[in-house]
Amino acid sequence: MTPAARLQAAIEILDLILSGRPAEQALTGWARTHRFAGSKDRAAIRDHVFDCLRCQRSFAHLGGAETGRALILGLLRAKDQNAAEIFSGQGHAPAPLARPEAAHAPGPMPENVALDCPDWLAPDLRHSLGVDFAPVMQRLRQRAPVFLRVNPARASLQQAREVLARDQIDTKPHALAPTALEITGNARKLRQSAAFAEGLVELQDAASQAVIHALPDPAGLRVLDYCAGGGGKALALAALGAHVTAHDANPARMQDLPARAARAGARITLADAPRGTFDMVVTDVPCSGSGSWRRAPAGKWRLTPAGLEALCSSQTQILHDAAGRVRAGGWLCYMTCSMLRAENAAQIDTFLAAHPEFRLILQRQFTPLDGGDGFYLAVMQKLD
């Protein structure tokens, strides 16, 4: 495919996403009906789509509308590229610019538009991030780094780097976690690499790893991962010597976990209804995902006040339910990939007021300025 044809494909996919189709579903559906597109074509198209979703407000401002075509036009204008040369209508290129498109002269951008921040969320984000608000929102407009978690049960950090290098995958350690590697070259080769196939590494954000290493030492403890999802944190805990039970309200989310655990050499028990109490209960709760909007940018635009309120109610209930699973002297660990105080410190304040049997021993807030995703952790201990 030509570069212009890739942009036309991105336009079509963006229109599907703007109509309500999930981004991954739209990309996968397009690929299935356009099998002539090679892997490099699909990767380039995906990059265009996600670049536009991260910067949807500012690109719509530059392009003159909130359509796939206008977003791609905004993307080109943001890069100071000659859109008329690409919108040529030749071959599979986008149709030539209409007179209003060519004549569109965008005025100055309001700050929230330039930062690609929803207006209704800006006050909450400002309150939560303080002086970091603008730098964080700028960082969320950029592509996220690709991080790996080295599995200490299979290899040391250096050994994993050497095995990855044999497959031409370049990496460097990251300061957020002792198990973290950032891929600096050939990230798309990872899933075909020996290091991945043999369980030496797993894809996991550096901040997500950092919160695991900030927990009390889990070695030898009975740990319940109460909102396990795909199992990334369950695997990380098991690699540190925990006896992990994984649970999720939707067990289908854990369907790949047994295979991932086998590859990693980890023993994890799956439980639809965990019984008894545990030394540590980890709750990585459903949240707005505001800390990971670089990776899932459509979520920034689809979140609503009612949706955030529902998430906060769910988080409150999960904390209440999980508290009963903690033994006396054990730990309740609350995590989100959010940067909103309403989902983080405010939740913990409310929980502690209702549960005086717990005391707060640690709080940490990571933002993309630290290098990884935005992530929050609170560790509470149940009094004897």
Image (tube, rainbow, N blue to C red):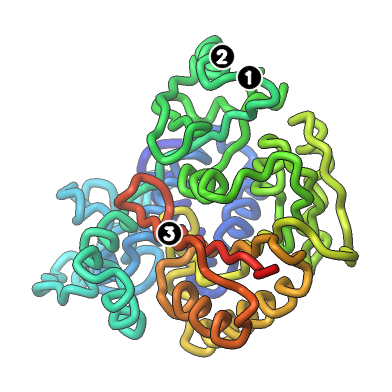
- Nearer-the-camera pick, 282 or 104: 282
Residue at 58% x, 19% y is 156
Q: Which residue is mark 3?
A: 364
Give x and y (percent) for residue 136: 28, 60
Q: Which of the two discs, 2 and 3, sits closer to the camera?
A: 3
As drawn, the label of residue 155 is: 1
Which numbered disc, 3 or 1, marks the residue that appears first in the sequence? Answer: 1
Give x and y (percent) for residue 194: 66, 18
Three-letter code for the amino acid on which mark 3 is drawn:
Arg
Residue at 71% x, 52% y is 230
Of helix, strand and loop, which one carries label 2? Answer: helix
Give x and y (percent) for residue 195: 63, 21
Q: Which residue is mark 2?
A: 159
For the C terminus, give its image quadrant.
bottom right
| Residue 271 visible in the picture | yes
Image side of residue 372 versus residue 74, left or right = right
Which numbered disc, 2 or 3, marks the residue that appears first in the sequence? Answer: 2
269 versus 261 height, above or below: below
Three-letter code for the amino acid on which mark 2 is drawn:
Gln
Quadrant of residue 77 in the image? bottom left
Of helix, strand and loop, which one carries label 3? Answer: strand
Of helix, strand and loop, which one carries label 1? Answer: loop
- Nearer-the-camera pick, 104 or 133: 133
Quadrant of residue 261 in the image? top right
Three-letter code for the amino acid on which mark 1 is drawn:
Ala
Image side of residue 12 versus residue 104, left or right = right
